[in-house]
Amino acid sequence: MNNDYKIKGKALEDITIIAEYIREDNEKAALKFIQILYNTFEKLAKFPNLGISRKDFTYKDVRFFVVKKHYLIVYNIENNSICILRVLSSYQNICALL
């Protein structure tokens, strides 16, 4: 694996929505959350098999990785790098959003 990752537009939208929601209560927490996400993206790029498949959510060829108990990074592996597809809250209807 070459440690590269791409972030799709939907995932960027997800990150913005989540960060704005957190920022309403605590701006520093929102910034910290974004930093944690990007650190996790780098970690997944190095070790793409850390995530798990969830056939109970979808039969698509995607993996899931939990961040801070309530958020899921949804990604797949493309051309020797990972592609971040979504960043979702566990409070959302994940199956419907995939």
Image (cartoon, grey):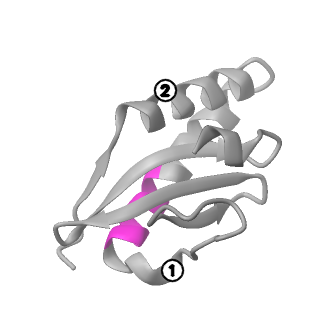
Q: Which quarter of the picture shows residue 5?
A: bottom left
Nearer-the-camera pick, 39 or 27: 39
Amino acid at pointer 2 = Glu
The secondary structure that most of the magenta stretch takes on is helix
In the depicted structure, whether residue 9 falls above or below residue 57: above
In the depicted structure, whether residue 73 falls above or below residue 78: above
What mark, if any, has residue 13 been given in the picture?
2
Give the crowd class for mark 1: few <14, some 14-19, many >=20 residues within 10 Å. Answer: few
| Between discs 1 and 2, the one toward the N terminus | 2
**What residue is drawn where x is 64% and y is 55%?**
72
In the rendered image, which residue does mark 1 sit on? Answer: 50
User: With 40 as the anchor, is 96 left or right in this view?
Assistant: right
Distance between mark 1 and mark 2 Cα atoms: 24 Å
Q: Which quarter of the picture shows residue 78?
A: bottom left
User: With 63 as the anchor, is 58 left or right in this view?
Assistant: right
**What residue is drawn where x is 59% and y is 66%?**
65
Secondary structure at numbered mark 1: helix
**What residue is drawn where x is 44% and y is 51%?**
38
Secondary structure at numbered mark 2: helix
- Residue 61, given in percent of the width and then of the height, sits at 44, 66
Amino acid at pointer 1 = Leu
Q: Which residues are magenta?
A: 38-45
Give the crowd class for mark 2: few <14, some 14-19, many >=20 residues within 10 Å. Answer: few
